[in-house]
Image (spheres, rainbow, N blue to C red):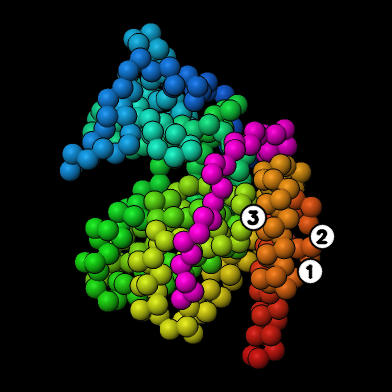
Amino acid sequence: MSEKILNDKLLSNKKPTFPIGTSLSDYVKRYNRATTIPVSYDDLLRFAGCITVYDKNDEDTLWVRCYYSDSDREQIDGHLKRIYDILHSDGRDKSLDYLNVDAVDYCTFGNTKPFRIRIRNILNDGFTYFYVKKADASRVYGLEIEHLLSPHRINFLVYKNTLIEEHIAGIPGDEFIENYMEDCDQQELTQIAKEFVKFNERCLIRLLGDMRSYNYVVIPTHDFDRVSYAIRAIDFDQQCYEGKLKVYRPQFFKENLAMVTNVATHLKSESIEQYKKEERALIAKRLINTQKRYRQLIKCMKADFISTPSKFKQLKKELHDFTGDVAFKSTRSMGGVLNTAMEFVKRNYHDADHENQFKI
């Protein structure tokens, strides 16, 4: 974790969007990730006008609020409310009369350019968000792996070439580093350091790239007389795409320098290694407990095209050099690379568990 932050360019200029193939489409249907409600990303692009959205400090958020013609708005509102009901309830339409689409915002920053939908319950003025994006096989794989192997569950839906994601609440990492981190006490900083080490290890094992500070959130939770923190990814389109292994290690992005410095300040190397082992063991346990569904997902992924041949060759070579596991040499796709990485973690967990049984 104390290794030098690299300033060279880790990421490609722009990641292409990979279509959802037949096998992945069948998978999302099998596990109730598909919807027949016709909410289309392209339909939302037909807004008649927009205005800039500013934050509480009157700074441009890089989001614009969209307006639609009366005829389009009525249909779009109805479909968006039904999608919300499916994401967060039983989808029986009984609560639709109490829902209102407060805002449809469009992001002008980054590759994805999602729509952010704000739904309000008119009975109590409570509101929540969800996102509408162009469907990308990489992102669907990333979301599903997050659901299966991370500490967090996540809801999403797919309709043809459109992806609907629930909102993940938390403080954006860049905002937390800039505005909140300096107010944390020593105990809290130590706990944040621990969580970043575990988050860093989790991203590496599952090959989720580009976890710069604005692609994850920090989630504070009050627990008796202290505040605990969790770190959670919110962007999943860099699942198994890049060839450089460092892309899958958040510690190497300069945007995370404050987090890396905090780890070096508050954790000894022995503690860092212990937290890495803990995270590997937890992932191995989740992998064992979700084996059937994971196998079906990996089968789709092995047959899919979600990267370029050169990036695939580079990543499997770097992983072989990093782990010493010759199984990486015989992989034939990014799905195979990920599966080999998971099997490596599971195998080492079983070996450690076997050794501990003899120690007892």
Q: Which residues, given as a range, are shown in magenta?
A: 2-30
Side of 98 where 304 appears, left or right: right
Kindly tell me whether residue 150 is visible in this rendering.
Answer: no
Q: Are marks 1 and 2 in contact (CB under 8 Å)?
A: yes
Q: Position of residue 185 (x, y in %)?
A: 24, 73
> Where is mark 1, residue-wise?
326
Q: Is residue 263 above or below residue 317?
A: below
Q: How many marks?
A: 3
Identify the residue at image location x=57%, y=42%: 15
> Where is mark 3, residue-wise?
243
Identify the residue at image location x=64%, y=90%: 360
**Which is nearer the N-term, disc 2 or disc 3?**
3
Q: Position of residue 275 (x, y in %)?
A: 49, 75
> Where is mark 2, residue-wise?
330
Tell me if mark 2 has few (under 14), some (14-19) or many (20+) residues whose alpha carbon lies within 10 angstroms of its own: few
Alpha-carbon span between mark 3 and mark 1:
18 Å
| Nearest the eye: 1 or 114 | 1
Side of 58 where 47 appears, left or right: right
- Chief secondary structure of the magenta portion: loop
Identify the residue at image location x=23%, y=36%: 54
Mark 3 is on which residue type? Gly
